[in-house]
Amino acid sequence: MHKSLSVISVLLFCIAITIPCTLNAQDNDSINSVLDSAEKFFLALKDKKFNSAWNLLSIKSQATIINDVYKASHKIGARTTKEDIRQDFSNSGIIFQNYWNAFLDTFDPGMILENSRWEIAFIKEDKAEIIITHKKSAEPARLKIFREDNTWKIGLVETFWTRKL
């Protein structure tokens, strides 16, 4: 009886040591995946690899951008459909290129990549948040990231379009 008790104690001790290591490894994998997706997105923008950036956006961000482009095009009298715009974005067409080039006229991804501190706010099963603080900013941005189809996607609209929503 004494021998079986010590075997159980050793077993419980081994389990107690292993669980935190396993959780930490999973946490590190999640942190690395979230940070990797965010970094790839901003690098793609900086390098004008717009197709890569587009593929890293959340479904909601993509749909909102297409809708915004549709509304803007109709304000200036263009006769196009949302499907035309969606198709142009899928094919990296002229509307797609113009959108991202105009976006870069007002947003410098280098500011986030080179002059900001990144901190993980939280990671849950299907969403995460990175606090990005620019060295000259009093208020940080809280970049929202979502797991879609087992990949971390950037919530550009969910993060920066908050006033419009």
Image (tube, rainbow, N blue to C red):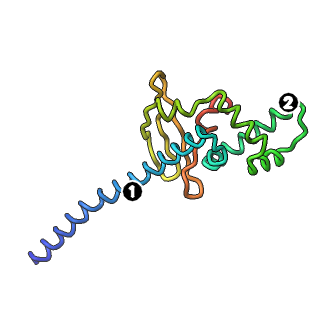
Q: Which element carries disc 1, helix, strand or loop?
A: helix
Please name whichever residue, 35 or 23, is drawn nearer the observer in this view of the structure: 35
> Type of residue at label 1?
Gln
Q: Is residue 60 visible?
A: no
- Whichever of callouts 2 and 1 sits on the residue coming sooner in the sequence is 1
Given residues 132 and 110, the one toward you in this image is: 110
Q: Residue visible at 82% across and 48% down?
A: 83
Q: Position of residue 90 (x, y in %)?
A: 74, 51
Percent of width and height locating residue 146: 56, 48
For label 2, the residue is 75
Q: Is residue 164 above or below residue 49?
A: above
Looking at this view, is 55 or 81 the one in front? 55
Which residue carries the number 1 mark?
26
* Residue 1 disc label: none
Number of disc labels: 2
Q: State left or right for residue 94 relative to residue 62.
A: right
Residue 51, horizontal then vertical, whole percent: 66, 47
- Whether residue 11 is visible, yes or no, is yes
Q: What x and y, as percent, mark residue 74? A: 86, 34
Mark 2 vs 1: CB contact within 8 A:
no
The quarter holding residue 106 reads top right
Q: Amino acid at mark 2?
A: Lys
Front residue of 77/158: it is 77
Q: Tag 2: Cα neighbours inside 10 Å, few (<14), some, or many (≥20)?
A: few
The image quarter containing residue 122 is top left
